[in-house]
């Protein structure tokens, strides 16, 4: 087993869960669609190391309600991966949305 400079052995890394805003994983329509398509299933093994414009990240983080880089990247990728699915999703859910009080609809990120 390899040891770190501190002499402590390297064990399996434990990753903290992605910190998502209250209300669960599907806080945007894109995330709900991605979840329905099974795109969020399975282990999270893809790692990113990227520099992004701070104001872009802050705007995206504010929109989904968390500053977790993993949550922001997941929401952004879900938006790209599901953009062609929005029309069919709206068509399937129109009756449900039409019956929803306007105050609740104002809280949904459409």
Image (tube, rainbow, N blue to C red):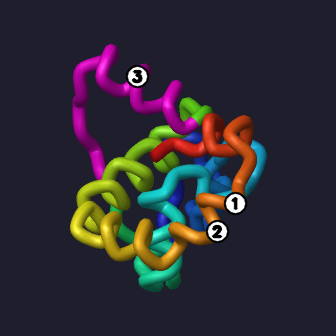
Q: Residue 44: percent from the left, percent from the top?
A: 47, 71
The label on residue 99 is: 1
> Circle 3 sits in a helix, a strand or a loop, which is it?
helix
Foreground: disc 2 or disc 3: 2
Magenta residues (range): 48-64
- Mark 2, other Cα within 10 Å: few <14 / some 14–19 / many ≥20: few
- For image coordinates 55% across by 30% down, the residue present is 67
State yes or no: discs 2 and 3 in contact (Cβ < 8 Å). Answer: no
User: Chief secondary structure of the magenta span?
Assistant: helix
Q: Earlier along the polypeptide chain: callout 1 or callout 3?
A: 3
Q: CA distance from mark 2 to mark 3?
A: 29 Å
State yes or no: discs 2 and 1 in contact (Cβ < 8 Å). Answer: yes
- 72 displayed left or right of 96: left
The label on residue 59 is: 3
> Circle 1 sits in a helix, a strand or a loop, which is it?
loop
Q: Answer whether residue 79 is magenta in the image.
A: no
- For image coordinates 48% across by 61% down, the residue present is 31
Q: Residue 98: percent from the left, percent from the top?
A: 61, 59
Q: Mark 2 highlights which residue? A: 96
**In the image shown, does 8 or 95 lie closer to the viewer?**
95
Q: Quadrant of residue 12?
A: bottom right
Foreground: disc 1 or disc 3: 1
């Amino acid at each position: 087993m390899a040891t770190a400079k501190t002499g402590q052995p390297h064990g399996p890394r434990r990753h903290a869960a992605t910190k998502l805003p209250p209300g669960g994983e599907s806080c945007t329509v894109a995330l709900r669609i991605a979840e329905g398509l099974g795109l969020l299933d399975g282990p999270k093994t893809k790692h990113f190391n990227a520099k992004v414009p701070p104001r872009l990240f802050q705007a995206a983080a504010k929109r989904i309600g968390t500053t977790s880089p993993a949550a922001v990247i997941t929401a952004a990728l879900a938006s790209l991966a599901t953009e062609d699915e929005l029309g069919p999703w709206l068509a399937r859910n129109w009756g449900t949305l039409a019956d929803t009080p306007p105050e609740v609809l104002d809280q949904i990120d459409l």
